[in-house]
Structures are given as C-alpha cells and as structure tokens.
Image (tube, helix red, strand yellow):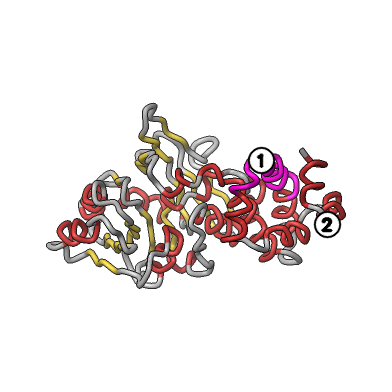
Amino acid sequence: MDGVCVIMTAYNAAGSVGRAIKSVLGQTYADTTLLVVEDCSTDGTYDVIMEAVKDASNARVVRPQENLGCGGARAFGLQFVDSTYVAFCDSDDWLESDHIAKMVAYAEAQEADVVHCPLYFIDNETHEHSTARNGIDVKEGGELLTELENHWLTSFNCMLVRTSHIQQIAYSALRCLDDRLSGLRLLLLGGRHVLLPVGCGVRYNYVTNEGSVFHSRAKNIPVYEAVVWMTLAREFYGGRDGVSDGVLSVFALRVLPRFLNNYERNKEAWDKLIAEEFPHIWADIAKFSSSFCVNLLKDKHKLTKELT
C-alpha cells in the first residue's frame, strides 16, 4: 500500500464533475489516484466522467447497481481502496493542485492517522473555517470527546485519513449527514488527529450548492441528527469508559431537545419521513434518552409538550 486515493461520488453532476476531476488529476503529489463512484446518474454525468478520465492512467470509475446516495456511494468506493491514505472530493468542489502533497506532508511530519484542513466556503460571502484553536492542534483519541458537537471535525472532505484507520469503522449509508455519523465514529475510534489552522497553506474548496441532496433535506436535519446520535448510542451503550456517557449526554441534553422543539412545527412531513426511513425512532429515543425523559415517552406528543 502506498500513495493517496481520492474518492469522488457523483450523481447528476454533469455541469461540475469535469472541473472536480481535473483538479484531482492535476495534483502535484505524484502518487495520487482518483476513484469516481458514478451513482447511477440520469443527466449524462457518466459520459462527462468518462471523457474527463479517458487519458488518465491513475483514474478508475465504478458504478453500483443502484443509486446509493452519497454515504452509500462512499462506502461502496472504500472497498476498492488499497492506498496508504484516502481523501474525498465532492463532484461540485475542487482541490488546489498542491492539496494532497501538503496534506501528506503534515500527516508524515506529525505521524497522524487523520489530518483535518480548513474548509473554504464558496458562496455569496466566501469565508474559511478551521477546527484548530491555536496554530496546529495535535489531539489524541479521548481528547476529542470534548468536541463531539463540532460539526467541522466530522467533514470527510477536510480529511486525509490513513486507510488502515478508516477501515476500522463502518461508513454510514445515510442519505443525509452520512459524514456526520461516519466522522463521529472516526473521532470515537481515537488515533492521532492533526487540526490545521486557517493560513496553513492548504484548504478544501466547498461550493454551496442549493440543489444538493443536503440542501434539499435541510429542513429535516434535526431528524437525521437524532438518528445519528441514537445510532452512536446503540453502538457505544455500555461500551468504552467515557465514550458512552459523552455520547448519551450530547444526545439527551442537546440533540433530543432540538429534535423535539421542531417536531410539532414539522409534524406531518416528519411523520412521513420517519415512517419511510426511521420507523423505530421513537422506541430508540425511549431507550437512550436521559432518565428525566423516559417515563414521558409513552406518549410522544406529551413528551414534546413537556420539553418545548
């Protein structure tokens, strides 16, 4: 195993995927390969991809048998990776030409399992965000338990991950917030994380796309967020010391109230979503919420009224 594999998932991205592919194939780090997961598009994306990679010996295109969504497509792609490191680039974003070279340099200098670079938002008001507090932060495993609610820490687009490390977790197939659940699993796994500050010379260019799956499901984010934390609660309940308490407390004291505060306002739409995708959500809430809620969960409407 050597080098870096960049996984790119693409669905109905004919207008942008060519630029994204060009940015990966143009990396100055010689041992960069591109794996494109073409997720059964209906708009000609596949033809654009094949044209963009036709002369590239370091690119591979794979297609699942059915549309999997971003999370499922990433999980599908990971089974083909045999490099030392893996990185991710969305089909509507792009990487600077020295992105991979700089990320690998930081990883090797710090003997890191995961390197997190700043995220550069490209929208009407461009701005850059970093998870680092003061200069380059190096954190070991359990230290990250205090930062479980930091959404930027779980963005895989900002990561370079040692392949042997990411292979120890199950990548989530959720169609929304897949990287949130998978990123939290990665943080809870431990290892050596390097957080790079703004101005470090490397960043991920993120295009705010109002037509994306994430934006189309944005009004339902509290539902997916609740599912993410309940999934973690199931996985870590009674598990490693400190992890269970950390996960359960964030779920019960932060995530659950947000979910309940919005439930009545979105009841009709959320009941439909829950019935289709998460039919066990109320039972899971009853099992993993804190003790002050449990007795009220016999009636979900009463619970909503009591906590809002």
The spot of residue 164 in percent (x, y) is: 46, 69
Q: In this picture, which residue range is highlighted in magenta?
A: 252-269
Which of the 4 image quarters holds residue 216? top left
Q: Which residue is mark 2?
A: 298
Query: Looking at the figure, which quarter contains the C terminus?
Result: top right
Disc 1, SS: helix
At 27% across and 46% down in the image, what residue appears? 98
Q: Position of residue 65 (x, y in %)?
A: 35, 72
The alpha-carbon separation of the residues under discs 2 and 1 comes to 19 Å
- Residue at 25% x, 55% y: name it: 43
What amino acid is found at the position of numbered circle 1 in the picture?
A: Asn
Give the residue type that dot 2 points to.
Answer: Lys
Q: Is 284 colored magenta in this rendering?
A: no
The residue indicated by pointer 1 is 262
Near-viewer residue (236 or 45): 45
> Residue at (79%, 41%) from the top-left corner?
305
Up-down relation of residue 281 to residue 93 (above or below): below
